[in-house]
Image (cartoon, rainbow, N blue to C red):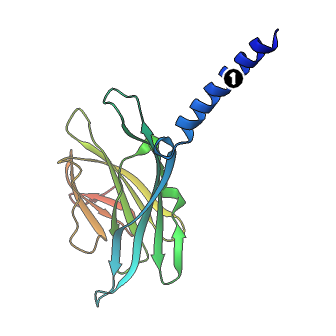
Amino acid sequence: MSAKHFFLRSFSCLLTLAIAFHFTACVPWSARKHVEMQTLAQKRDENGIVVEAITQTHEYGTMSTLISPEGPGTASFSHSLTFYLEDSHGKSLLSFLREDDRHFYPYEFLPVAHSPYWIATKSSRGNPHGHDLVSLVVFDRRDIVHKRTFDVLWRGRIKSDDGNRTLLFEGEQGIQRYDVLSDTLELEGTKK
């Protein structure tokens, strides 16, 4: 191989690498990590002072795209939600409630009055019969206390009038009462 041929081949390789480096290392085309924090629910004492809160950290990445069906834009990826219980003792990670890309349905949180417990509900919609499966997790700052799944009519609507100690919902067999503290389900006066 002649020196001229070697020089041209090396120069074209270096030029290709320089162009590739320029477009991938440029700030507008690089990936960025984002962290957003949000308070989702609060438990208050009889004076209205917040004594506990459920907070969430949402981590995700974004990257500018040059080529897509819609043209240049921003794509997001790797969504991850982490939940915490914050109180006078500090901040506790609720690792049993972690969500990722495969299960990106939001939790709804309800404080249970006059107790150390919280309720996390998650509804999976789309049942062909018009019902929702509602997953319910009763937990404290350390772990899960109870876990249940209910078949609920009327778009997963659950009501409570006693500080979330008893939950009412309509199932196929009628109105049902779930006692959060004792983990019992009653249907028209009979316990399950």
Q: Residue furthest bottom?
A: 47
Residue in the foreground of this view, choosing between 152 and 61: 61
Side (left or right) of 19 relative to 105: right
Residue 182 visible in the shown view: no
In the rendering, at what x and y percent does residue 13 appear?
Answer: 68, 22
Residue drawn at x 42%, y 35% as measured from the top left: 65
Q: Residue furthest top?
A: 1
Q: Which residue is mark 1?
A: 11
Side (left or right) of 104 relative to 92: left
Q: Residue furthest front?
A: 4
Q: In the figure, residue 54 lies in which quadrant?
A: bottom left
Residue drawn at x 26%, y 44% as measured from the top left: 132
Residue drawn at x 73%, y 21% as measured from the top left: 10
Q: Secondary structure at mark 1?
A: helix
In the rendering, at what x and y percent does residue 58 appear?
Answer: 44, 57
Residue in the foreground of this view, choosing between 189 and 3: 3
Residue 34 visible in the shown view: yes
Residue drawn at x 40%, y 28% as measured from the top left: 67
Q: In the figure, residue 62 lies in which quadrant?
A: top left
Side (left or right) of 134 relative to 131: right
Quadrant position of the C terminus in the picture: bottom left
In the rendering, at what x and y percent does residue 113 appear?
Answer: 33, 77
Side (left or right) of 168 relative to 112: left
Compared with 161, 167 (above or below) is above
In the rendering, at what x and y percent does residue 161 appear?
Answer: 20, 71
Callout 1: few (<14), some (14-19), or many (20+) C-alpha neighbours within 10 Å? few
Quadrant position of the N terminus in the picture: top right
Residue type at mark 1 is Phe
Compared with 25, 95 (above or below) is below
Residue in the foreground of this view, choosing between 50 and 127: 50
